[in-house]
Image (spheres, rainbow, N blue to C red):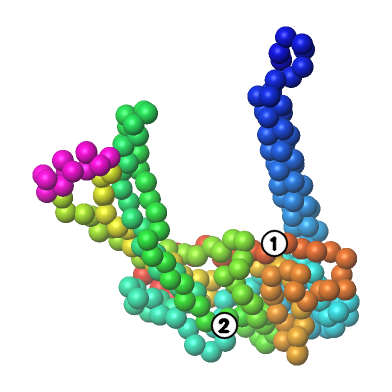
Amino acid sequence: MDNSGKPSTAQVVLLATSSALTAVFYAIYRRKSATATRLKEARKIPIDQDLKSVLMESPGHCIPYAVIEGVVRSVKDSLNSQFVDNCKGVIERLTLREQKMVWNRTTHIWNDCEKIIHQRTNTVPFDLASHDEGVATAVRVVRPLDAAELDLETTYENFHPVAQSLTDVIGHFISGERPKGVKETEEMLRLGADVTGVGELVLDGGLARLQPPGRACRTSSARWTTTRWCAGSRPACGSGCC
């Protein structure tokens, strides 16, 4: 405050900034809280012979937020691992990450730094099928790459170190960056993996589809904003494991 008892410009700016941040954090909190509440309210739907009947009886042939558990099964073709024999899946993600150390001029410490320099994701259509092989009903997964969480299994990992000469080392100290190498990984959603999907379940043309919420259930008062597929754990991929 100044001598007159009025708040200074700096205090007003600080108050305004603080209020704005509080509003932003509160909005994030409300959105996350609403999502958590809807997750608790999500209806678990078994993949069985009655699945289509359940959807037929639902408003708009749609359940706005459903939990589906099933086994990954390709619709037609599958993807082969580029590094592991007999390892097949429906999603494959190849990533190159540059790893280096950066000199912090404030703390005088070398800090590890990693950034993605290349990433490619391949996918083929797939279903979630019942664990009971006698049940023919399946659920088609739509736009899985839009999921809020996509749990893929690391099937291959390799680090390619950078060869460094004495001149390079001196240059790194001058520039403040010390390259370590490139980490190459392959991640997959494999055939036969146990998956839990949460999203909008709709009957479309006789086909049950699990998709990001808010696309088909227009008659529902609920407006879901997130979807997630979580793959269950299985042993790491090895020769003949899949």
| Residue at the extreme front of the image, as rendered | 4
- Residue 221 placement (x, y as % from top left): 88, 65
Which quarter of the image is occupied by the C terminus? bottom left
In the image, residue 218 sits, relative to residue 7, either above or below, namely below
- Residue 117 appears in the picture as rendered: yes
| Residue at the extreme top of the image, as rendered | 3
Q: Residue 10 magenta-drawn?
A: no
Give residue 144's quadrant in the image: bottom right
Near mark 1 (Cα within 10 A), the count class, few <14, some 14-19 or many ≥20, is many
Q: Nearer the viewer, mark 2 or mark 1?
A: 1
Main secondary structure type of the part rendered in magenta: helix
In the image, residue 234 sits, relative to residue 218, either above or below, namely above
Q: Nearer the viewer, residue 191 or 120?
A: 120
At x 61%, y 66%, the residue is 147
Q: Identify the mark at residue 226; answer none if there is no mark.
A: 1
In the image, residue 6 sits, relative to residue 191, either above or below, namely above
Mark 2 falls on what kind of element? loop
**158 lies left or right of 116:** left
Q: Nearer the viewer, residue 64 or 74?
A: 64
Find the magenta span and give its range.
165-176
Q: Which residue is mark 2?
A: 125
At x 71%, y 43%, the residue is 24
Q: Identify the mark at residue 164; answer none if there is no mark.
A: none
Mark 1 falls on what kind of element? loop
Tag 2: residue type?
A: Pro
In the image, residue 170 sits, relative to residue 216, either above or below, namely above
At x 27%, y 54%, the residue is 181
Q: How far separated are the C-alphas under marks 2 and 1?
A: 21 Å
